[in-house]
Image (cartoon, grey):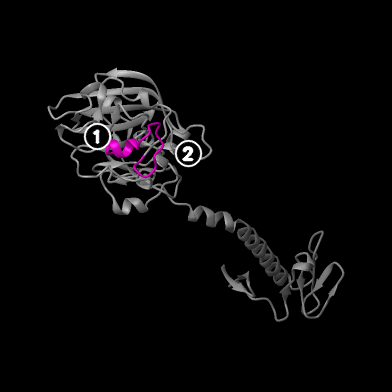
Amino acid sequence: MKVRALGGGLSPFWRGPQPERGLGWHPGSGGSLLTSEGTEPGSERVSGGGVCLGGGGAQVRRKQGLCGVGRTVLRTLISCQQALLALPLLLLLLSTPHCAPQTPLIRGDALEKSCLQQPLDCDDIYSQGYQTDGVYLIYPEGPSVPVPVFCDMTTEGGKWTVFQKRFNGSVSFFRGWNDYKLGFGRADGEYWLGLQNLHLLTLKQKYELRVDLEDFENNTAYAKYADFSIAPNAVSAEEDGYSLYVAGFEDGGAGDSLSYHSGQKFSTFDRDQDLFLQNCAALSSGAFWFRSCHFANLNGFYLGGPHLSYANGINWAQWKGFYYSLKRTEMKIRRA
């Protein structure tokens, strides 16, 4: 059977045996066969005087084959009506995107793929069986907005979603508010994931934070915080300044330079939200959750080790002080 549009609606078109001239079907007849010769109450008259009763069982005198064809047409029409009722659900199922596998370290066509169960973070990606370090797509904002991110799948059991990464100074981090809100850089290089993405992630799950550090002598250290969130109680995270909340410090040799910043709004050179009289972001050549001003300045200038200027490099004061700019930093979160 085919379906075609007639008069703005869907109408069945069948190729079975054709009834005699004048035989038709009318929805108001309760499923009866009608002829051009007229009807009697409760029955339908067919050409040649045969009768096919519409209810309580058929009493066929003649033209039995014709009545059978009529019932076949009726059943076909009812089946067609049922199919039409199910059509919206079928179209919805057909239009729903199927799950596309993640492929590490690719971009381009990967951005156009979507999945019935899009991963929120690298923890979800790990659970899907992808356990190699690399760039993957996550969906903090919803199923239609993929975001590339670097997943650390090896450090301390893996599953880390990296939201800040620096290692060679190829990307400038001295940027304005919109860049820090939305993110910048490339997930396969230096980048910042974006304050809005961070807020959406920490709004949906409970996370811990790990900060990995390395100097130019290849020494490494880290600091961990059992609780990490961005503007957790804010109706508008941006109006709240994407405030930082950290707690539960665990020392990995780096010392605690971040607890001082907990509760502070994020500041950039074009949006001063710190507590100092001057603009901490401008003074420190970076952007961060400045207080008055900082013990951590991981988005400062990439100055390549010791520097003469005060506190404007990639500083983690409790490890290397205010006059040493680090070689590598990674800020990453994992579900607690």
Q: Please indicate, yes or no, whether residue 287 appears anywhere in the rendered image.
A: no
Residue receiving disc 2: 237
Which quarter of the picture shows residue 54? bottom right
x, y (%) of residue 210? 31, 27
x, y (%) of residue 68? 70, 67
For this rendering, which residue is in front, 260 or 39? 260
Q: Is residue 33 magenta?
A: no
Which quarter of the picture shows residue 275? top left
Q: Which residues are magenta?
A: 268-286
The three-letter amino acid code for the residue at tag 2 is Ala
Quick one: which residue is furthest to the right in this view?
Answer: 41
Q: Is residue 45 above or below residue 325?
A: below
The three-letter amino acid code for the residue at tag 1 is Asn
Quadrant the N terminus occupies: bottom right
Left-right relation of 57 to 254: right
Q: Please indicate, yes or no, whether residue 169 appears anywhere in the rendered image.
A: yes
Q: Is label 2 or label 1 in front?
A: 1
Q: Main secondary structure of the magenta part?
A: loop
Say few, some or many: other residues with alpha carbon within 10 Å of mark 1 (under 14 / 14 to 19 / 20 or more). many
Q: Secondary structure at mark 1?
A: loop
For this rendering, which residue is in front, 55 or 48? 55
Left-right relation of 110 to 312: right
For this rendering, which residue is in front, 47 or 183? 183
x, y (%) of residue 204? 47, 34
Q: Secondary structure at mark 2?
A: loop
Q: CA distance from mark 2 to mark 1?
A: 27 Å
Residue receiving disc 1: 312
Say few, some or many: other residues with alpha carbon within 10 Å of mark 2 (under 14 / 14 to 19 / 20 or more). some
Q: Is residue 270 magenta?
A: yes
x, y (%) of residue 267? 37, 38
Mark earlier in primary sequence (2, 1): 2
